[in-house]
Amino acid sequence: MQTMKFIWFDGKMVPWDQAQVHVLTHALHYGSAIFEGIRAYACVDGTSAVFRLQDHCKRMLNSAKILRMELPYSADQLAEACIETLTANKLPEGYIRPLSFVGHGEMGVYPGNNPVQTIIAVWPWGAYLGAEALEKGIRVKTSTFARSHVNTCMSKAKASGNYINSILAKIEAKEEGFDEAVMLDTSGFVSEATGENIFIVRDGIIKTTPLTSILGGITRQSIMALARDLGYTVEEQQFTRDEFYIADEAFFTGTAAELTPIRELDHRLIGAGHAGPAEGDEERADRLFKLKCFMLFLGLKIVRRTVTDENGETVFLFRRKGIRHLFERIPMRAWQVDQWIDQKLGFLDNPFARTVTPYGIIRLRMGTLRLKAPKDVMSDVSFAQYQSAQNLLIMYWDAQKVLQTLVRRKSTHAAIRMQLRRMKQARCRFLATLFNESVRETGEIREGRYLRKCKRRVWSFNSGQIQKNARWFSMVEARMFPVMVQYFQSVQEAYARMYQELFTPNGKKNGRQNPIKIEVEMINNIMKYQGFSDYDAVYDSEAVRILGIMNAMAKEAKEIEKMNQKYRKGK
């Protein structure tokens, strides 16, 4: 800690080294003290700004009330004293620590008439959990020490004595090689860290623990307000540590810790396992698509546990599929996985290579519902199925634009939540459209003079599956929707390049072509690229009709653009 010139002590500026108390001070023996942590930040114009100073001072008075300590200062006087201390020490940016404690007098648990004294100290303090914590995220563990019961210690008071189990949890975490500890409450739910509040993000919803066994952080309040203003759904809800394990993102908030990302909990990666800006839909879909192909091509299964090597680098543990490899462990570092993808799956950067979905048969509804993804749009997707998926995708994009308008106009939280639900329903219905159920098909086969009846199960589309199966995708749509959207759009882009004659201007000048010639060339290209054996197989797959509707959509878009250009010229 860097020493400063002065400490504010009971209304006077005292030199740093002379701010002393008696060794028999009551707070030193029994923890009868309250404090606050406040940060001041240097601004661009040369001034300083103290973050929510009045709120911190009010909370300090509330802590004093809970502990039945009578402070002779108001919130305004404490705030003025904090600014005075910063000015006296010529500190534009740093940490402010107001502390009130029961002083020297009678000994024993009962404080009696011992005086209550107040000090305010300031000093420069960078990132609480280290400079790398904000860039890479931190590794945390679940502590064996539980947060005190609400009737054991008053959790709404920021009292010195309340931090004994935080100290023990912090020591335990540091000795085991972690940066911080997560503490559970006495019921087993996630409570808070040793000095920070906890947030997790899953399926686009931000969750934080309710104000039952935790200290209501002022930084926590600010993060919740900012997130809601930006259109995110924020819920105060109890959650268990296994829900923490499968979160997409997680972070700590606090005055000292500010906003610190969490990359790992109990040797399990949180989300992508690194800190940084949230990936967009396109980047996330690209990553999910490649990782899925990586697992499929190597025939591996990931063990949901990671370890850290001697250099602090995260190591993934894989095993091969099959019972005989149940206890096998194949360690691969993150850079090795990325290198393998770059070397072996480089062809996936080509849009033509993404016309095959990485999914096969998936199981939903506790494993009782088996659905099959289309391997290829030309051969596995019917015209009605393609049209339904396209309409649902357009519906989703329209809902996304409406949501942006609601956020921009600062609409009510209820309206924003309703629009988010509509977007989720559209995503689920889009997936339910592309994944087919198996149905029993009956038929007759004539062998000479004998007629034999046969039954078989086939994967086929029916319009009823959209409404029936949509709800079962609600738990997996967050990770499956970006992959399938990219697959669907890649197919459209690939076929637009493959059959360019369908998407050329169809006017009266040089762009005009013989429609019979176009269809013949189109059928020949389909047979060439898709491997159909004869023309009947092409028409049976409804590939021509799918390309037809894509052509109609392209022409309609061009006509609209021409009308807009004429309108703009007319104005």
Image (cartoon, rainbow, N blue to C red):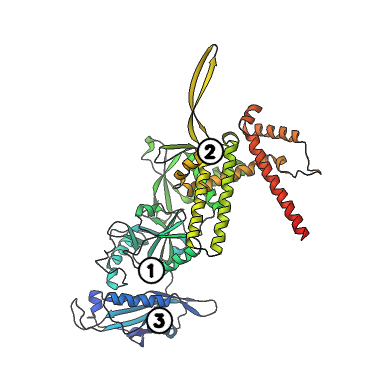
Residue at label 1? Answer: 217
Between marks 2 and 1, how big is the CA–CA gap?
A: 50 Å
User: Which mark lies nearer to you, 2 or 1?
Assistant: 2
Tell me what residue is drawn at x 48 percent, y 66 percent: 226
Q: Is residue 184 above or below residue 103?
A: above
Residue at label 3? Answer: 79
Q: Are marks 2 and 3 in contact (CB under 8 Å)?
A: no
Between marks 2 and 3, how big is the CA–CA gap?
A: 66 Å
Q: Amino acid at mark 2?
A: Ser
Q: Nearer the viewer, residue 413 or 222?
A: 413
Residue at label 2? Answer: 463
* Helix, strand or loop at mark 1: loop
Of callouts 1 and 3, the N-terminal one = 3
* Helix, strand or loop at mark 2: loop
Q: Is residue 555 above or below residue 240?
A: above
Q: Is residue 308 visible?
A: no
